[in-house]
Image (cartoon, rainbow, N blue to C red):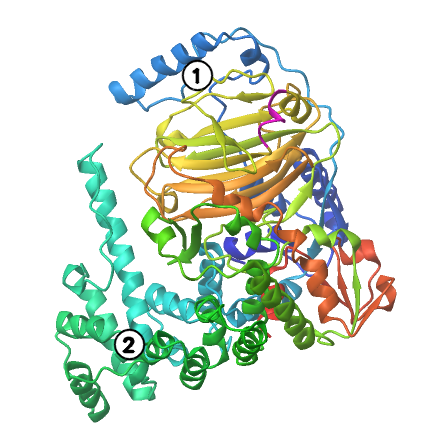
Amino acid sequence: MLPIFEDHLFAQGYFVAEDSAADVERAEAVAAALALLWHYARIRIIACPELADAHMLKVAQRNLGLNVPEAFYQGFPNSVRDLDPTLRLADQLLHYFRTYCLGDFSRTGHSVFEARYERLAFAEDVKPKEFAIITPAKADELLKNTMEGFLSSTRPLNASSQELLEAYVASNPEFLVERCACKDTAIRIILNTGNLNFTRFIGLSDVIRLVEWLHELRYQEQKLVYSEFHPGLSILEYAPVSQMKKLNLHNRDRKLIIAVIDQLFERGRVDIDTCLEKKRVWNGLLHHLHYQPKCACAQEFCEIIRGKDRRSVYSAMERCLAVGDVRGATDALLKAKGPGAVLRHLDHLLSRIDATQNPAQVEADVDYVLAACNSRNRLILVQLLLKYGVLADYYYNQKARTFVFVRLGQLVKHHESEEECSGCKSLLPRDRAKHVSRWVREQLERICHGTLGRVYVADNLHRFAVPLQEGASMGGFGTLPRGTRIPIPEGKKVRAFTYWEKVDDIDLSCFALSDHGHKIEFSWRTMAIEDSRAILYSGDQTSGYDGGSEYFDVDFKAFVREFGNEYDYLVFCNNVYSSKTFDQCVCRAGYMLRDSLDSGEVYEPSTVQSSFVVNCASRAAYLFALDLHDPAFVWLNLGEHSMQNIAGEGDVSFLLRYMHQTDIFNVRDFAVMLASEVVTTPEEADVVFADASAEELGLHEGQELIRPNNTARLLELLNA
């Protein structure tokens, strides 16, 4: 089995046996394998332990870390506590002089002022990680179900899931792909594998999206080359695909685009009206490709695009809105684009309703627009529920709003300017937003009810978020949907970590953030100023291709005593300081829960709660946050569209919207909506939602278990 499949199953809590049956003669090897897994990472096998083998240790080490580089302070944190901040700064300056001034990255950097230290043996009571061993046949079944879940999602996949899907399709030619609900997913498969069979899931208008992906890939290449040969100089701003004269595509890119266009004409997937919405862009693209039509349909399309026809649904909608005809605008959008388009433009339509009318007429107009949103797309409805629910208060409390969205696999944020704030017309009155929120929840409950029959839901699932827009996230052991809150046990200390290879320097930074958006930075830049025993930093290590690592230790009680009146959260992020992006190096990040920070090694795999791959095509990533007043670990897991190589620049208050997302909607709410009947014990259920194994729950054959980390199955249910 390919390592990528083993790693995915490991993240789900499974090892795959090399043999489907136990062999009595290998009993000693089985015992040794079980002992090694326990010694290395406190991994306990709760199903089929007789199938254990030595290869499973390699899988665990690949995911949890093997020979992780030492920290800058080898005795961290004991040797750092009493080190004067001035000496810490001198340490770093000497290290920077050797690496950046002398260009010496040949050896791992360590402190020159660190006192002698002696580590205690690791002897903490660690909660075991429970895994099951499954047969290859069962593994194939799980992988197939996962791929079907990914293909049913109407939202783009993250880089890890996309890579997994492409590997599965390539290595299993017998796997018949009958549906690919997200056009971005199909486009990325076409680009990355050249598989033109996936053109049957896109239309001609989606070619512009394909070109955007190609353009972004080439632009990233250009930026990295520019930054390598012009260090310290700013890079030209990204040229949008609408400026086709600035396209920088290779000849092979042009050939691929032409082949896709020809395939779409052959398949009859030509949506001319939608293409006319981007008439100027299409004109530029056809000119750039020197496109020659090969059939009558293609000839007709080229003539229309190059002609004077300017049909557009959105122009018809705007003409209606200009004269105050919201109902006419709704009808135009509904007729041409369907209820999903009305849902996507809900703010735009509802905000244009004349509030000076009598209240009964305003409510009638609101209900008219909502009636057109007769969509059965659960995922869109959940997104709207979050938008118009309690999170709406976030927007009303801001003088200038920050909008975030996922574009080409990365988080993009836009902060309103003063001019945009003064001209804003789309902010709904509070009462109208609450009316929409109630309607969305009722609609969602109606279309979900009875989907899964008799359902048991574990109590703690109210802390888990549902996967919505995970396209900018990253995958690996312990990852969960953005906004998920994991309680931190009383007395435990948190060690955040990152380690890397194939790049000179990656920085782990931390911000204390208040509910009002105020922040204070803790990083290599502030270590001589923000001196605190409540949060200790391991030092900024640069070490070249041998790899490096950085850590933060947080003592919750001490930090709350020192900063609790001013700040509410700690936010951790990664930045690539060198002239590369995360997807061009090897980087992992995560956190450990420790009893004693000085016990054992700095990196103890048995205490690791999460170790995920940071592989976004940028230099900036938000990792996770810690809630200081309700001790919990909050998943962020966002790759930002940015070449910013140091943290601390720009506004990060937009992250506040994720801190209490589960208060509005969570896995428990979703599971209850899907049930025809909610039962009180797992034995009675057809489907069980729980953060536990089937063995722990005592499930029998025929019962389905859905765990909160089963993203593919949750996506399938959200997109049913």
- Label placed on residue 411: none
Pick the quarter of the image with the C terminus.
Answer: bottom right
Q: Where is residue 664 in the image (x, y as percent from the top left)?
A: 65, 56
User: Is any part of residue 13 visible from this angle?
Assistant: no
Q: Quick check: 317 left or right of 51?
A: left
State the residue in front, 454 or 385.
385
Res 713 quadrant in image? bottom right
Res 493 quadrant in image? top right
Q: Where is residue 206 in the image (x, y as percent from the top left)?
A: 33, 74
Res 125 quadrant in image? top right
User: Is any part of residue 669 visible from this angle?
Assistant: yes
Task: Establish if 671 lies above or below 638.
Answer: below
- At 51% across and 15% down in the image, what residue appears? 531
Q: How crowded is mark 1: few (under 14 residues within 10 Å), some or many (20 or more)?
A: many
* Helix, strand or loop for disc 2: loop
Q: Quick check: 425 left or right of 71?
A: left
Judging by the rendered image, the residue that carries numbered circle 1 is 110
At label 1, the amino acid type is His
Pick the quarter of the image with the N terminus.
Answer: bottom right
Task: Establish if 673 lies above or below 270.
Answer: above
Q: Overall secondary structure of the magenta stretch?
A: loop
At label 2, the amino acid type is Glu
Q: Quick check: 39 left or right of 678?
A: left
- At 56% across and 74% down in the image, what residue appears? 377
Query: Of circles 2 and 1, which is in front?
Result: 2
Q: Where is residue 594 in the image (x, y as percent from the top left)?
A: 67, 28
- At 58% across and 68% down in the image, what residue appears? 381
Residue 564 in magenta stretch: yes
Stretch of the chain drawn in magenta: 562-567
Residue 363 in magenta stretch: no
Judging by the rendered image, the residue that carries numbered circle 2 is 277
Q: Position of residue 9 (x, y in %)?
A: 60, 55
